[in-house]
Image: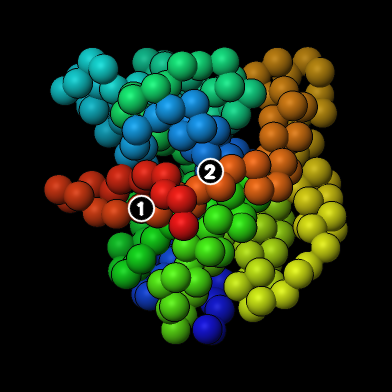
Amino acid sequence: MKFHYTNLETCHESTGTVIVVDVVRAFTSAAFAFSKGAKEIYPVSKVEEALAFKTRDPNVLVCGEIGGLPPEGFDFGNSPSRVLELDLNGRTLVQRTGAGTQGVVRSVNAENMLAASFVVASATTKYVNRLSPENVTFVVTGQTYDGGDEDLACAQYLEELLRGRSPDPVPFLERVKNSSDAKVFYNPEKLLFPESDIEHCISLDRFDFAMPIARQNGKFIMRCVKP
């Protein structure tokens, strides 16, 4: 198994198995949504795309962010703490974020694709190992925005697991807490950026499912699968 790293600018070139990483907070929130009963999640690029889903089907819930905050018309934002308060049983979600979902929709040449974060790390590696790919590419989504060490930390941790090693997770999780993207969550005046979100983002292996992404009718669709 050979490993490669890319970002939002170059992920369109990636082939084989592609793991799109967004720790703070898109694919942590997605995992929490599945844990609260969500049936499926459609990752999209633009706010208008997300809202168009809701126009066609009022039962769809739209979530995500621009600049960390939910756009007008969205049902909720990108906070795993908020997701824990919701009943999403059987619901279809549409997710738009500035990093994570962009990595999905831009990885157009991937043969197999998964969304990943620390909360599904072990399950993700189990799923990938069953695929037995020759090449694995990590899309470190946050790097495009002059940050993303938390995403790089997660990708490097996943690589260690895929190499059959047993890395100490603490240094990797500390990089999330100390990342530039985490700073806003330590400001008590930023109520839509609760510090509890970071604690949720570093809750390693909280869930026992992976989040593979398939193409269906020209759209990307994410589901949770226990490997």
Q: Give the class, few, some or many, for how many residues have Cα within 10 Å of label 2's Cα (few <14, many ≥20).
A: many
Q: Residue at x 54, y 77 (%)?
A: 4
Name the image quarter holding residue 10: bottom left
The quadrant holding residue 121 is bottom right
Residue 124 is labelled as none
Colour pattern of the rendering: rainbow
Query: Residue 180: x and y, percent?
Result: 76, 45
Q: Amino acid at mark 2?
A: Phe
Q: Position of residue 179 (x, y in %)?
A: 77, 48
Disc 1 or 2, which lies upstream in sequence? 2
x and y, in percent, of residue 46 in the image: 34, 37
Q: What secondary structure is marked by label 2?
A: helix
Where residue 82 sits, quadrant-wise, is top right
- Residue kind at label 1, given as amino acid type: Ile
Q: Residue at left 36%, top 66%?
A: 112
Q: Residues within 10 Å of mark 1 (few under 14, many from 20)?
A: many
Task: Say which residue label 1 marks.
Answer: 213
Q: Measuring 34% from the left and 24% from the top, which residue is drawn there? A: 91
Question: Which residue position is annotated with label 2?
Answer: 27
As helix, strand or loop, the secondary structure at mark 1 comes to strand
The front one of 165 and 56 is 165
Judge from the rendering whether residue 206 lies leftward or rightward of residue 62; answer left or right. right
Q: What is the C-alpha distance between the residues marked 1 and 2?
A: 12 Å
The residue nearer to you, when weighing 85 against 10, is: 85
In the displayed structure, does residue 181 sit left or right of residue 85? right
